[in-house]
Image (spheres, rainbow, N blue to C red):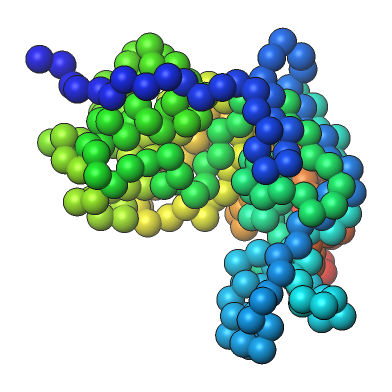
Amino acid sequence: MGPRLVHAAPLPRSSLVLGVTVSSDDLQVSITTKDACVDFPIFDAKSRSLKKTVMGVVGGNIDSGARVPIIEALRGITLQLEHGARVGLVGHNGAGKSTLLRLLAGIYEPTRGTAAIRGRVAPVFDLGVGMDPEISGLDNIMIRGLFLGMTRKQMEQRVDDIADFTELGDFLDMPLRTYSTGMRVRLALGVVTSIDPEILLLDEGIGAVDAAFLEKSRRRLSELVERSGLLVFASHSDEFLRELCDTAIWMEHGQIKQHGAIDDVLRSYKGHAG
């Protein structure tokens, strides 16, 4: 008897997610933003610990002059990325890299400006999104795949390969709530790296797995990049950035400080940081 998989329809391939136009059709894969800004209001503005926590997560600057103080997480982001682009994101923690990835994934709405994403997006961060702790690992493979825009038939064809990659064995028949953090990461990585994305948004800081599996994941992520139409990759590893990207964006205080050839941007960033 084969594995039991849930029956569900794939997600629509064209949608409006939180004000970010996300579509997939016969037109060219692309990412276009114009003067995009992302703000987060701080309603408990007297709490210094809350300010510090929010700044650590989204980066940017605090605008204390507004009636309700806000974190200006992204400011004036203008990008035109076409099919074939391989773009690295660099910057210190809190510079806005992760927030930019979430904007491009349609998770965050631009407070001002616009963001249009044309293509099926595979976000390799927030790995638990689209997964249910009360159902089995096998069922979550299907749910996560549908969440990423794959069809049920496509996921059925991939389930054995995903199971082999995760090395989770009999745990795949158990509810996700019984998994350790590392096991959940293995499952999510197995699904994400099995698809054929048009746009791949990758954050290297996914951790929580042992060194041997991390190296195995890195090889599989490299293969995923080869299959993708467009890549945006946030990393602190110059070696991995040079391996996967030919251009880079340096983020600082929620703004694009430099956008150009990978070696030029890394040289400027390292010179500034040093």
**Residue 218 visible in the picture:** yes
**Residue 171 visible in the picture:** no
Q: For the view shown, which residue lies furthest in the left direction? A: 1
Q: Is residue 153 above or below residue 225?
A: above
Residue 236 percent across, percent down from the top left = 62, 57
Q: Residue at x 35, y 27 (%)?
A: 142
Q: For the view shown, which residue lies furthest in the front direction? A: 67
Q: Nearer the viewer, residue 15 or 104?
A: 15
Q: Is residue 200 left or right of residue 4?
A: right
User: Which quadrant of the view contains residue 227?
Assistant: top right
Residue 172 percent across, percent down from the top left = 20, 36
Q: Is residue 130 left or right of residue 132?
A: right
Q: Residue at x 31, y 20 (%)?
A: 7
Q: Is residue 222 above or below residue 99?
A: above
Q: Is residue 272 left or right of residue 232?
A: right
Q: Nearer the viewer, residue 139 or 186?
A: 139
Residue 260 percent across, percent down from the top left = 86, 44
User: Which quadrant of the view contains residue 157?
Assistant: top left
